[in-house]
């Protein structure tokens, strides 16, 4: 087929699709990370796991497409209001959490929606790694008496540390490493989990003189994410004892607010000397509190600071000692009242001749000191046959008093006051006012305010609806335009709404219309703003490569947009375009004329030229009709050089400790080692391994497998690259999967050299049947380069596997790992390599030819 005709046919189909269907498209979404993770891996081919160390910065970006521009929301769940992080959702493309906490690990969702189709949702699981300082506690038990003066004493040392991943422990006595079976008097239990974390127990049976020593517990997580080991030391002596304390205060302590309260706690025993701390029932002491030694001082105490306070003594021997006291702060808190029957819920007046009960409830501390009194219109009210005052039993319902009015009369209308006080004074009284009267209810209407957009010559119907009013039988209405009366009347008893119609809108009809609904209690107001203002345009963000290079110092931008609800008002005759350089005040404006009627979803285009590199610009677009200017839309244009955002070129020489986000496989037999010849141990195995990095520098770093003992033949070490995203597919053509050239330098010197393999690992797919490159045996004392073309169909990783040979002279090294777009060029792979040959598909040639022809037409 003629390539030019093929291109023209495809373009015709694309243009026809845009003309018929517009450019509205539902959202798509994918998540990329900033690359600061310790590891990004796939679990069971369905879940992305992003590993990060506590305190590092988490940065995830949500890339979306779709038009209108989708709204983006990050949540900790799939969209429910529960478990949202930071008490709210994040509404932008990038989720940034500085100094991430362990509690912030979990699954994060990015949701994009623009009203077309179902929302697009992607997720990623974040695993936060950490290791806390271990804590050693000592417990002992004394057995039954054997003979007269002998007791068997058994001591347990418990080591606890919080960590992720699970911690590994080791015990030391002095410089001696303790292991199970190394000492008959020592027994080490397997770790088990408690609420405090994973626990390791060292048991000292029948305590001996040599058991009095320094014990250290070392906690480790295999140095993942660069987390170093942590340790703690405990000295065990024949005087070691659990703490005991005494509290020199009364219980409870009753005080008035504003007083200063001091609580004193002393230690009466314990070795090592116990540390005293104060805690409250709320787990945190008041902000103004002061602690000095064993004394806690609460200056100018408030009712919020009342509660139980405890002195805790701990020296990590046995259980902590704890003594508590209760502080009671005398207080009155304003409560609530209610009326039976309740006129607000029954929508009725309190009627003459019926019984009415007013209840008043107040919170008092202490409740037994509470007293009540009642006032009517400011005067003291005493209990009588028609007005009965009762106070409920404090043991049943504390803090409540009732006023029963029997046979309500017109003279009973007024203001009733409930006054609460504490016996003994010192606390101000509080009062609650209750008004008993014949009530009315002003009308409640809808809509309170609404905007109505309409073109000239078209009808406009405005409706004001009554939701509630009392009395409803005396309702009337009036319609006004800018305070000019248009129409008035009384409500029909069968209707709860009134309408006003403009048969044919003219210029004088634009403005604010008001409908007042009135009864004797007041008025409710509906407001309608009638306008011919056009809706805002919608910028189209999904243009492929919207920024292109025109001349060395300037660039052009292809501005594209659609119009929201173009037929709602008069025809749009032009757009006013405003543009200004970021950081400057001056706007440049021009009009873009519009020929004909704009259809919904129609894509409009305007080229912005002579933009200065690399400046950014603010663009404002405003539609214009016979009414005048409509709503504006603003966007920022930022210059960016035309690049492939998915993968350009990857190069890693292992010079930095993070080793370019490569990770060690957790399921292999041992790990690759990062080294340089300048720092390598002088006792290393001779006659194998490199004497410098690939460039010959003894200070340069490389990765190698150490094959000395305890390694044995066949053991494997695998190094896994970060994930690479492939370029997106072209929806209007059929192409082969993109090609990438994977290259690296290898050093395989020694008579016991095993095998070096390279694998391709793709997202969502099982591991491949075999390596894409493999080489075995001694290759001489020099660095060589390997290259192999790979054709992934999804996000992928490359895996380098070193296999130990039959002896210790089998160190294999790698350096300068690269990944570039396109097929491999230059030197062919080693002849002993088993990498498969690459076939070039005829479609790749066709696509290349079509691309060349299109470039020639620009």
Image (cartoon, rainbow, N blue to C red):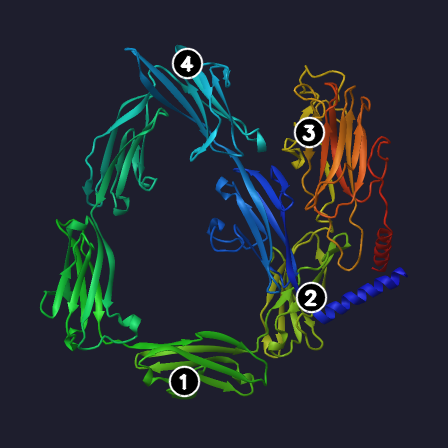
Determine contact: label 4, label 3, CB under 8 Å. Answer: no
Dot 3: few (<14), some (14–19), or many (≥20) neighbours within 10 Å? many
Left or right: residue 35 versus residue 469 is right
Q: Nearer the viewer, residue 501 or 41?
A: 41
Residue 211: give its label.
Answer: 4
Kindly state the secondary structure of the residue where label 2 is placed: loop
Dot 4: few (<14), some (14–19), or many (≥20) neighbours within 10 Å? some
Q: Is residue 377 visible?
A: no
Please report whichever mark, 3 or 2, sits nearer to the chain's N-terminal start: 2
Please report whichever mark, 1 or 4, sits nearer to the chain's N-terminal start: 4
Q: Nearer the viewer, residue 771 or 5?
A: 771
Q: Reply above or below: 119 against 464.
A: above
Determine contact: label 3, label 2, CB under 8 Å. Answer: no
Residue at 23 percent of width and 35 percent of height: 262
Q: Quadrant of residue 56?
A: top right
Residue 495: give its label.
Answer: 1
**Nearest-to-viewer mark from 4 and 2:** 4
Q: Where is mark 2, residue-wise? A: 23
Q: CA distance from mark 1 to mark 2?
A: 46 Å
């Amino acid at each position: 087929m003629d390539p030019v005709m093929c291109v023209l046919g495809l373009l015709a189909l694309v243009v026809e699709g845009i003309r018929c269907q517009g450019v509205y498209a539902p959202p798509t979404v994918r998540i990329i990370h900033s690359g600061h993770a310790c590891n990004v891996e796939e679990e069971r081919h369905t879940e992305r796991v992003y590993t990060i160390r506590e305190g590092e910065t988490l940065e995830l970006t949500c890339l979306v497409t779709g038009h209108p521009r989708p709204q983006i929301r990050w949540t900790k769940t799939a969209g429910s209001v529960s478990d949202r992080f930071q008490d709210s959702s994040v509404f932008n493309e990038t989720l940034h959490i500085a100094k991430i906490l362990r509690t912030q690990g979990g699954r994060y969702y990015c949701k994009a929606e623009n009203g077309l189709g179902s929302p697009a949702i992607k997720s990623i699981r974040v695993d936060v790694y950490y290791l806390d300082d271990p804590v050693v506690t000592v417990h002992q038990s004394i057995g039954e008496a054997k003979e007269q003066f002998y007791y068997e004493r058994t001591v347990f040392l418990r080591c606890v540390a919080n960590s992720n991943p699970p911690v590994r422990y080791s015990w030391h006595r002095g410089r001696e490493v303790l292991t199970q079976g190394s000492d008959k008097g020592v027994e080490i239990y397997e770790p088990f989990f408690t609420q405090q974390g994973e626990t390791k127990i060292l048991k000292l049976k029948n305590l001996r003189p040599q058991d009095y020593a320094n014990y250290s517990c070392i906690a480790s997580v295999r140095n993942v994410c660069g987390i170093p080991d942590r340790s703690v030391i405990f000295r065990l002596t024949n005087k070691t004892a659990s703490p005991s304390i005494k509290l020199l205060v009364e219980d409870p302590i009753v005080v008035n607010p504003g007083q200063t309260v001091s609580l004193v706690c002393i230690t009466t025993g314990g070795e090592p000397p116990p540390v005293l701390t104060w805690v409250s029932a709320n787990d945190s002491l008041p902000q103004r509190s002061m602690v000095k030694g064993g004394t806690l001082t609460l200056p100018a105490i408030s009712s919020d600071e009342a509660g139980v306070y405890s002195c805790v003594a701990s020296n990590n021997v046995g259980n902590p000692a704890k003594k508590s006291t209760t502080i009671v702060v005398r207080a009155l808190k304003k409560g609530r009242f209610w009326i039976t029957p309740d006129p607000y819920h029954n929508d009725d007046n309190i009627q003459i001749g019926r019984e009415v009960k007013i209840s008043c409830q107040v919170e008092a501390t202490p409740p037994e000191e509470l007293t009540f009194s009642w006032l009517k219109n400011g005067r003291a009210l005493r209990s009588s046959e028609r007005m009965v005052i009762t106070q409920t039993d404090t043991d049943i319902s504390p803090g409540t008093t009732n006023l029963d009015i029997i046979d309500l009369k017109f003279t009973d209308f007024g203001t009733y006051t409930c006054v609460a006080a504490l016996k003994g004074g010192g606390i101000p009284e509080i009062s609650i006012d209750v008004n008993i009267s014949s009530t009315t209810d002003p009308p409640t209407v809808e809509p309170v305010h609404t905007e109505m957009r309409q073109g000239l010559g078209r009808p406009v119907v405005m409706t004001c609806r009554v939701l509630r009013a009392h009395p409803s039988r005396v309702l009337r209405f009036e319609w006004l335009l800018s305070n000019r009366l248009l129409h008035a009347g009384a409500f029909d008893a069968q209707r709860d709404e009134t309408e006003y119609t403009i048969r044919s809108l003219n210029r004088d009809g634009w403005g604010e219309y008001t409908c007042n609904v009135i009864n004797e209690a007041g008025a409710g107001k509906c407001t309608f703003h009638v306008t011919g203002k056009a809706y805002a345009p919608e910028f189209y963000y999904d243009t492929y490569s919207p920024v292109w290079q025109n001349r060395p110092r300037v660039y052009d931008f292809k501005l594209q947009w659609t119009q929201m609800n173009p037929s709602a008002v008069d025809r749009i005759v032009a757009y006013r375009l405003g543009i200004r350089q970021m950081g400057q005040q001056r706007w440049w404006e021009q009009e873009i004329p519009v020929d004909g009627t704009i259809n919904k979803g129609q894509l409009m285009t305007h080229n912005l030229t002579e933009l200065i590199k690399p400046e950014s610009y603010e663009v404002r677009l405003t539609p214009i009709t016979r009414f005048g200017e409509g709503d504006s839309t603003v966007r920022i244009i930022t210059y960016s050089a035309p690049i492939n955002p998915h993968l350009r070129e990857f190069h890693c020489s292992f010079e930095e400790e993070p080793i370019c986000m490569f990770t060690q496989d957790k399921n292999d037999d041992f790990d690759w080692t990062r080294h340089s010849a300048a720092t390598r141990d002088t006792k290393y195995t001779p006659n194998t391994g490199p004497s410098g990095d690939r460039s010959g520098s003894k200070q340069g770093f490389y990765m190698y497998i150490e094959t000395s003992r305890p390694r044995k033949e066949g053991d494997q070490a695998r190094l896994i690259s970060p994930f690479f995203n492939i370029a997106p597919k072209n929806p209007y053509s059929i192409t082969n999967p993109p090609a990438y050239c994977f290259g690296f330098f290898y050093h395989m010197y020694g008579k016991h050299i095993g095998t070096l393999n390279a694998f391709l690992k793709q997202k969502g797919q099982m591991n491949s049947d075999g390596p894409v490159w493999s080489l075995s045996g001694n290759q001489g004392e020099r660095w060589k380069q390997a290259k192999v073309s790979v054709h992934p169909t999804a996000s992928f990783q490359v895996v380098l596997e070193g296999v130990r040979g039959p002896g210790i002279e089998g160190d294999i090294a790698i350096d300068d790992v690269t990944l570039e777009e396109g097929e491999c060029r230059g030197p062919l792979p080693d002849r002993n390599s088993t990498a498969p040959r690459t076939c070039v598909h005829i479609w790749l040639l066709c696509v290349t030819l079509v691309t060349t022809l299109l470039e020639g037409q620009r």
